[in-house]
Image (tube, rainbow, N blue to C red):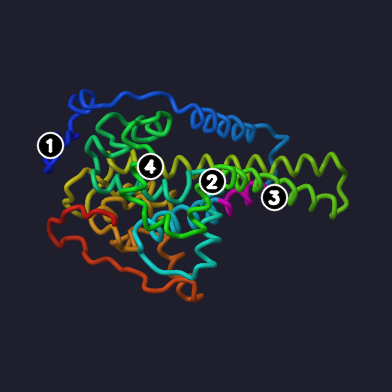
Amino acid sequence: MAAGRRTGASMTIVTTAAEATAARPALRPHWVNIVGISFYHLVAALAFFPYFFSWTAVIVAAAGTFVFGTIGINVFYHRYLTHKGFQSPKWFEKWMAVMAICSFQDTPAHWVAVHRRHHEYADDEPDPHTPVRSFLWAHVGWILVHSPDMSRYEIYARYAKDVLRDPFLRSLENQRVYLGIIVAHWFVFFGAGAGWTLISGGTGAEALQFGLGLVVWGVFVRTVFNWHNTWAVNSVSHMWGYRNYETDEHSRNNVVLGLTAMGEGWHNNHHADPRSARHGHRPWEIDVTYWTIRLFGVMGLAWRITEPMISPGGGAVKTKPAQ
């Protein structure tokens, strides 16, 4: 990765691996995240056992990837809440917030604060998941440690005041509420599977098997898949791919992630024009998340949808803070 340095009024920002190591604050393990992420991966691995498999469970997982991942994370957390790419009615905002919580990617305020900080310092040491440290750090390592400069109080005060002004979104900061929603949706999946089996005349053993199958596939496999899509945008899309715009960081458009992450992989386009609700700027850059927002617009659930202010070939641009 190219070396460089950006100097601000109060700090010098490092952009090489050696400087990053020297400037790195003391870190300690974040055991809650380590245990939680490990647990989800272990349960998701049960999908390899035939007992938990059914094509219905696979279809539910695919549908859940769209509802909880594309709508919850991409549409709501990212393009709506962080970047204000469109407007939406309050009741629909609340529904999307709950869908996002079920993706287990932290609270709305924390997700927004981390992402806005990323845009401000993209690929420099203050970037929470800078790939300058390493690919593994950018992908998941940063989540597994407590970083002194990433305390909730510090980053909320600077990056998420607008989110916390909303009473409902602020209530989701309560860990009992946050974790309660996550655990409750496990039981919704299990109850739906077991209940349907019993109503259809199945036995108790069959109900148990199908209910557990929906939980393994519809919750854990789906969540792990969405995690790695989101994490790969932070890592892969800052290391490999092509660039439509000469931004002042290392963002890339990655074709694979453009497809698997429903448009989030067109990351260079996004860094060049953060507020735009559309990340695919060329005809072949498929952006399912943007199409979803447009569908919401037709349904009266989204308006003032922000379109790109730039186009490929328009010359050099600078990364803009995502405020």
Query: Which comes before the other along the chain, label 3 or label 4?
Result: 4
Look at the picture and state if 27 lies above or below 194: above
Packing grade of label 2 (10 A; few <14, some 14-19, many >=20) is: few
Query: Which comes before the other along the chain, label 2 or label 3?
Result: 2
Residue 309's disc number: none
Real-space CA distance between mark 2 and mark 1, rounded to the nearest whole angstrom: 40 Å
Residue situated in front as seen by the camera: 76 or 269: 76
Q: What residue type is labelled 2?
A: Asn
Task: Tell me which secondary structure the magenta stretch mostly adopts.
Answer: helix
Query: Which comes before the other along the chain, label 2 or label 1?
Result: 1
- Residue at 20% over, 23% down: 22
Circle 2 is placed at which residue position?
Answer: 174
Packing grade of label 4 (10 A; few <14, some 14-19, many >=20) is: few
- Residue at 52% over, 43% down: 104
Q: Is mark 2 on a helix, strand or loop?
A: loop
Circle 3 is placed at which residue position?
Answer: 188
Specify whether 226 is left or right of 317. Answer: right
Q: Is mark 4 on a helix, strand or loop?
A: helix
- Percent coordinates x, y for residue 79 in the rendering: 38, 59
Q: Are marks 1 and 4 in contact (CB under 8 Å)?
A: no
Packing grade of label 1 (10 A; few <14, some 14-19, many >=20) is: few
Circle 4 is placed at which residue position?
Answer: 153
Circle 1 is placed at which residue position?
Answer: 4
User: Which stretch appears magenta?
Assistant: 56-64
- Percent coordinates x, y for residue 117 in the rendering: 29, 46
Q: What residue type is labelled 1?
A: Gly
Nearer the observer: mark 2 or 3; the answer is 2
Query: Which comes before the other along the chain, label 2 or label 4?
Result: 4
